[in-house]
């Protein structure tokens, strides 16, 4: 009864270090780790202790007897990572060195290490987690929204509730006594980088890649066009996208690009609304999906099947729960690629594609809408005058025109980092130039004192939630080494002055107690409806819920009055 890693694997490697027999690979110190789409349990070496199950923050691991039908392909995917061999032959041991953070050195007359983290998504929270393993360290997390956790809250699709379970880990981190939230505070607007540095030894930016890559073709911007990430933010109730005009009154949606975000969108647009009603999807999105006229979502890639950007676990999750089809020409492309491609992962994807049904000319009539994966279509222009009516593609390599009618055209061609005021920026790579997380001034080639980056703004918009764990650890190791070597100066401002500064600039700042009040109110709103939460989608409602909890200053005053 070996254990099996399934679709929601986040790659954070916690299972690797929990496993007593080193049977989970690739480990973070093995060469294939960075490119791996998931981790795999060796069924021969697994001793079924379940330590990995407890360590996994996203509930991705189960014994093979407890898998549901849709998860069964993962038995073979886990096993096929390892060479075929008799059941009594163990593989030679490999290293799985748990990376160790250098100890923060406490020196007389020096202030304890105090770090500002900007952003509150996975990279920020993993960095806080690493820093707080050290005695005496203080971490202040600044976030421009009144709610934390970045893309886990606003980017992970609502039907991936397992993935959202990583917030339980982040909640534990945020309850550490050295940790403080300053939510609803925007760095660069309410406080500057220099002001943060005056109150901290270092500022670590984990702000992600907040912009979408834009497709520069005629017609983008017409009503009926949007980016997939905008749509995902709308589905997830992000307050800045709650009013996005989304018209689902047409039969077909075209998504340009075929990464995991494109699959997320296709999956949600074809989901059974009654199933979504048991998730934390925003009410406005659920209402629109209940009235949707969409019968087909076409996911169009400019390259062939062997270059599909989606991952195998997500493809399996999709094909197990939706009608996914290819047209005849694309089936031929899959067969063509299968005849030439040798790498195991790509072959597994192609095998999964080759088993899909064939698209008939018209979208399915009754039942749930279908998804059509389409290949070698280069987008040329969005059709329509007043609003989008479709996309004109050219067949990649031949130039032959292909028109696909659609009432909604979404681009899903990746994210883009944006400049941070006061720091250098590499426009072509759209990230902050850095070495191991230390921000580097491109003119001098030297580190910018006290400035660090982690996550997508450091390495670009690739990887999974857990990829940020090792990324953030690398940055924190550099930061601690700089503190220990004396390269970081003690903050000029007195401890305690930060609160006064923040309250002066941003009276509506939300602290940990305020966030917990928002959280509790959302969970209570959802409880009656059988949902994990019903999110607020308006900042004013969030602040009202946060205000139901007395702010620290008010709490202290109330306590003092109560003592009289
Ligand atoms: P992505 O994986 O980088 O995919 C981008 C897609 O856009 C590719 O198909 C790419 O095609 C296409 N593209 C780029 N420029 C184009 C152009 N000018 N015209 C047409 N197509 C173009 O991006 P993503 O889907 O936004 O995902 C970002 C990261 O988040 C990925 O690492 C992804 O795995 C991760 N993510 C993971 C999950 C999950 O684990 N469930 C969910 C969401 C996101 P080419 O390959 O031809 O360039």
Image (spheres, grey):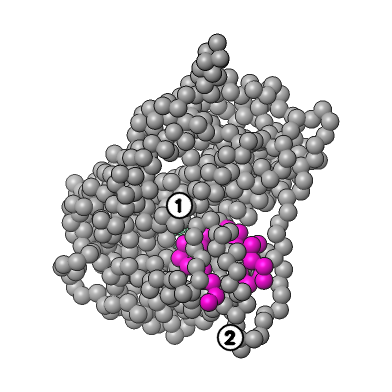
The residue identified by callout 2 is 84
Q: Residue furthest left?
A: 365
Report the Cα–Cα distance between label 2 and label 1. 35 Å
Pointers 2 and 1 in contact (CB under 8 A)?
A: no
Callout 2 secondary element: loop
Q: Which mark sits nearer the N-terminus, 2 or 1?
A: 2
Judge the density around disc 1: few (<14), some (14-19), many (≥20) Cα neighbours within 10 Å: many
Residue at 47 percent of width and 52 percent of height: 165
In the picture, measured across the screen, residue 40 lies left or right of residue 302, that is: right
Pointer 1: what residue?
164
Q: Residue at x 29, y 52 (%)?
A: 277
Name the residue rendered at 53%, 79% in the picture. Answer: 80
- Asked where in the image residue 202 lies, by quadrant, the reply is top right
The answer to whether residue 139 of the structure is visible from this angle is: yes
Q: Nearer the viewer, residue 142 or 158?
A: 158
Report the magenta residues as a range. Answer: 1-24
């Amino acid at each position: 009864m070996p254990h099996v890693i399934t679709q929601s694997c986040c790659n954070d490697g916690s299972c690797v270090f929990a496993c007593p027999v080193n049977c989970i690979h690739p480990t973070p110190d093995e060469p294939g780790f960075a490119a791996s789409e998931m981790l795999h349990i060796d069924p021969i070496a697994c001793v079924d202790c379940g330590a990995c199950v407890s360590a996994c923050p996203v509930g991705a691991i189960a014994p093979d007897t407890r898998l549901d039908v849709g998860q069964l392909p993962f038995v073979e995917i886990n096993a096929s990572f390892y060479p075929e061999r008799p059941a009594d032959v163990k593989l030679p041991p490999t290293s799985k060195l748990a990376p160790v953070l250098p100890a923060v050195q406490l020196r007389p007359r020096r202030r304890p290490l105090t770090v500002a983290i900007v952003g509150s998504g996975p990279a920020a929270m993993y960095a806080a987690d690493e820093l707080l393993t050290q005695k005496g360290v203080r971490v202040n997390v600044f976030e421009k929204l009144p709610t934390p956790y970045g893309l886990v809250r606003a980017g992970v699709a609502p039907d991936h509730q397992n993935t959202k379970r990583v917030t339980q880990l982040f909640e534990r981190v945020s309850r550490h006594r050295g940790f403080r939230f300053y939510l609803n505070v925007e760095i660069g607007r309410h406080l500057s980088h220099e002001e943060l540095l005056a109150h901290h030894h270092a500022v670590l930016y984990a702000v992600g890649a907040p912009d979408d890559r834009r497709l520069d073709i005629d017609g983008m911007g017409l009503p009926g066009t949007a980016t997939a990430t905008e749509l995902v933010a709308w589905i997830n109730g992000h307050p800045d996208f709650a009013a996005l005009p989304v018209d689902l009154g047409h039969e077909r949606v075209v998504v340009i690009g075929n990464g995991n975000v494109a699959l997320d969108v296709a999956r949600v647009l074809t989901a059974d609304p009654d199933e979504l009603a048991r998730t934390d999807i925003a009410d406005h999105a659920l209402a629109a999906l209940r009235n949707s006229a969409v019968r087909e979502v076409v996911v169009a890639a400019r390259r062939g099947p062997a270059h599909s950007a989606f991952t195998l676990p997500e493809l399996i999750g999709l094909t197990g729960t939706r009608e996914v089809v290819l047209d005849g020409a694309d089936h031929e492309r899959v067969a063509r690629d299968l005849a030439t491609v040798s790498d195991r992962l790509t072959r597994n994807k192609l095998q999964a594609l080759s088993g899909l049904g064939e698209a008939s000319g018209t979208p399915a009539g009754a039942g749930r809408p279908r998804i059509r994966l389409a290949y070698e279509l280069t987008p040329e222009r969005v059709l329509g005058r007043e609003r989008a009516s479709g996309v004109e593609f050219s067949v990649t390599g031949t130039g032959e025109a292909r028109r696909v009618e659609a009432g909604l055209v979404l681009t899903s061609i990746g994210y883009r980092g944006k400049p941070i005021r006061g720091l250098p920026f590499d426009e072509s790579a759209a990230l902050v130039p850095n070495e191991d997380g230390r921000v580097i001034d491109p003119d001098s080639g030297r580190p910018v004192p006290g400035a660090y980056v982690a996550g997508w703004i450091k390495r670009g918009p690739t990887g999974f939630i857990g990829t940020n764990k090792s990324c953030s650890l690398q940055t924190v190791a550099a930061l601690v080494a700089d503190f220990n070597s004396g390269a970081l100066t003690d903050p000029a401002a007195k401890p305690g002055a930060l609160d006064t500064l923040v309250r002066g600039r941003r009276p509506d700042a939300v602290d940990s107690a305020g966030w917990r009040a928002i959280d509790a109110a959302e969970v209570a709103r959802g409880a009656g409806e059988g949902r994990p939460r019903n999110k607020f989608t308006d900042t004013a409602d969030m602040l009202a819920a946060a205000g139901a909890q007395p702010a620290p200053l008010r709490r202290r005053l109330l306590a003092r009055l109560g003592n009289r």
